[in-house]
Amino acid sequence: MTVEVDKESGFCPGVVSAIRKAEGELKTRRTLYCLGDIVHNSMEVRRLEELGLVTIRKEDLEGLSDTKVLLRAHGEPPATYQLAASRGIEIVDATCPVVLQLQKKIRRMYEAEPDSQIVIFGKHGHAEVVGLVGQTDNTAIVVEHDDELDKIDYSRPVRLFSQTTMSVEQFRQLCVEVGRRMKNPSDLQTYDTICRQVANRIPHMRAFAMRHDVVLFVSGRKSSNGKALFEVCQSANPRSYFVSQPDEVSADMVQGAESIGVCGATSTPRWQMEQVASRVAQWSGKNEC
Ligand code: SF4
């Protein structure tokens, strides 16, 4: 039996950079507050908490002052920066540059075209989407499902953006449907703002899942990217299992398999996939590659 850890799985650059910033800060101070989970992976969060990272909610910001707070890769709306400034809180900004660029693009559009409707294809309540909507003084229309398309006024210009982690295919379908409904199709401008760090992993992950007898997909349960990539594995290989930590892997899962693939989400640390691979390799006493 062989066990292969997917070389392309694991943290995306935005998450790597946020974690490095946190680790760097924690070398010089005992405590660093982080607004929301730094990554949707409870084991990695726990590791950083042991170094002094303290995860807080937005409500907690009001009770802090004269300290440092890290903003994670998803980004935050302008109101968070304003609140921090009013409390004397220094921001350690780990907003991913891809998200930051999208925030600026939406802000510029909102300011330059007051008559246009900014529409964001994204998940309601997701931190990145909250940050994007905040660029428009909370006036942007969020569309997650087709049945929300009636919220758009098709007689007015529409500027359609996407949250960075949405499906490219679904965004394309949405653009076609919105274009079909427009009174004047030239009033629609679409911006594919999907991060290729996620999108480009899909064909690779499909091929990886197909070449193994069993796939162990490692991810935190809160990760939406994890759910989406797991579905890709499952559709390519029905013997795909979602595990959030090594001890969830059982011998039954890998019984009879000659090749096992271990992969994960953009929020899955490499060490966690390696722990899963070692556990499986120990049972078999065979190769790990
Ligand atoms: S998925 Fe892309 S946009 Fe999101 S944090 Fe990672 S690199 Fe940045």
Image: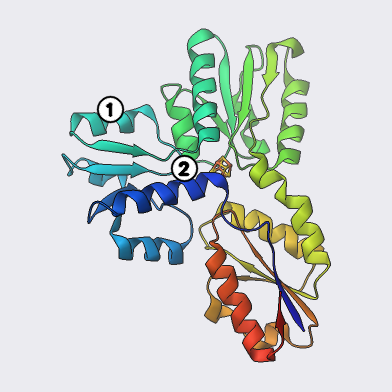
Residue at image position (66%, 17%) is 154
User: Does label 1 or label 2 sit earlier along the sequence?
Assistant: 2
Residue 188, horizontal then vertical, whole percent: 69, 16
Q: Split into 4 quadrants, where in the image is the C terminus?
A: bottom right
The residue indicated by pointer 1 is 82
Label 1: few (<14), some (14–19) or many (≥20) C-alpha neighbours in 10 Å: few
Residue 51, horizontal then vertical, whole percent: 31, 62
Nearest to the observer: residue 51 or residue 82: 51
Quadrant of residue 206 within the rendered picture: bottom right
Residue at image position (65%, 58%) is 9
Q: Secondary structure at mark 1?
A: helix
Q: Is residue 283 left or right of residue 66?
A: right
Nearest to the observer: residue 4 or residue 119: 4
The residue indicated by pointer 2 is 73
Residue 62, horizontal then vertical, whole percent: 20, 40
Cα separation, mark 1 vs mark 2, equals 18 Å
Q: Split into 4 quadrants, where in the image is the N terminus?
A: bottom right
The three-letter amino acid code for the residue at tag 2 is: Ala
Nearest to the observer: residue 165 or residue 187: 165
Q: Nearer the viewer, mark 1 or mark 2?
A: 2
Nearest to the observer: residue 132 or residue 207: 207
Mark 2 CB within 8 Å of ligand 1: yes
Residue at image position (37%, 60%) is 48
Q: How many marks?
A: 2
